[in-house]
Image (tube, helix red, strand yellow):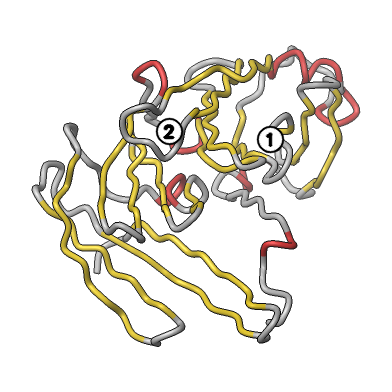
């Protein structure tokens, strides 16, 4: 099949020592299509199941972009979500329905790494630094409601100021650098991870402190295709 959008979730029954997981995937074959096929694999029954659903999306859909689709995705309470150009596509695996929500302020992305979508502290968050050195982060209230969901700005980060403040990480310069990647802390909504000049840093919006998380140790051009993924260890099966 063509490059699919992929979702994964798992759970642990600690009382009985059982680990189970579910994988879902779907492919966008046309920008405007009336239906979509969701393929789902459950470890509990050990088979793939197909669900053909009506697409309740008023805008065009786009094929998976590897640079963004893999990391800007998630699941909460059986509801999977993905970033799709101007939209968030959503699949409710419980009620078997598929729909979409628009990004804040009618945003869209040309470059996959200019934005990120993810869960942080139980909140669905979106960040964008399209064409600027300023990162704006939003929170989606009332998710996964289809009618009452509303984007609210959480905070704004001036990347140039961060770079100038920490020359020991980035060297002395004019403070202008492209954010190669960004991802939310899975548990703390006020912390954002950024990949800049081949280094991964964490930025705390509350304290305005920056910490070096990892230095790839190579020229930043060699790291431009890297992806960042965040996860909270206790959520993963401890029996594997």
Residue 83 vertical position relative to residue 15 in the rendered view, above or below:
above
**Left or right, 231 with reference to 123:** right
Q: Position of residue 30 (x, y in %)?
A: 13, 48
Q: Position of residue 13 (x, y in %)?
A: 63, 77
In this orientation, which residue lies closer to the viewer: 43 or 85?
43
- Local secondary structure at mark 1: strand
Q: Quadrant of residue 19?
A: bottom right
Instruction: Single out the residue that lies furthest toward the left.
Output: 34
**Left or right, 229 with reference to 89:** right
Query: Which quadrant would the N terminus be assigned to in this image?
Result: bottom left
The residue that mark 1 highlights is: 194
Ranked by sequence position, the earlier of labels 1 and 2 is 2
* Residue 111 badge: 2
C-alpha span from label 1 to label 2: 16 Å
Q: Position of residue 133 (x, y in %)?
A: 60, 16
**Residue at the location (52% across, 49% down)?**
71
Q: Position of residue 205 (x, y in %)?
A: 76, 22
């Amino acid at each position: 099949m063509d490059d699919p959008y992929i979702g994964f979730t798992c759970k642990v029954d600690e009382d009985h020592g059982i680990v189970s997981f579910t994988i879902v995937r779907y492919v966008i074959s046309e920008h405007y299509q009336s239906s979509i096929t969701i393929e789902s694999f459950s470890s509990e029954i050990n088979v793939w199941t197909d669900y053909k659903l009506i697409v309740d999306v008023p805008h065009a859909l786009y094929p998976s972009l590897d640079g963004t689709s893999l990391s800007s995705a998630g699941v909460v309470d059986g509801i999977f979500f993905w970033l799709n150009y101007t939209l968030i596509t959503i699949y409710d695996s419980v009620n078997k329905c598929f729909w979409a929500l628009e990004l804040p302020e009618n945003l869209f992305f040309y470059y996959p790494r200019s934005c990120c979508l993810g869960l942080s502290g139980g909140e669905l968050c979106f960040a964008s630094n399209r064409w600027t050195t300023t990162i704006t982060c939003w929170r989606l209230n009332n998710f996964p409601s289809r009618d009452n969901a509303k984007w609210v700005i959480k905070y704004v980060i001036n990347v140039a100021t961060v770079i100038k403040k920490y020359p020991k990480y980035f060297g002395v310069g004019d403070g202008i650098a492209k954010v190669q990647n960004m991802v939310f802390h899975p548990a703390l909504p006020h912390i954002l991870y950024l990949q800049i000049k081949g280094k991964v840093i964490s930025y705390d919006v509350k304290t305005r402190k920056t910490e070096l998380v990892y230095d790839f140790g190579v020229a930043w051009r060699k790291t431009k295709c890297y992806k960042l993924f965040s996860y909270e260890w206790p959520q993963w099966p401890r029996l594997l």
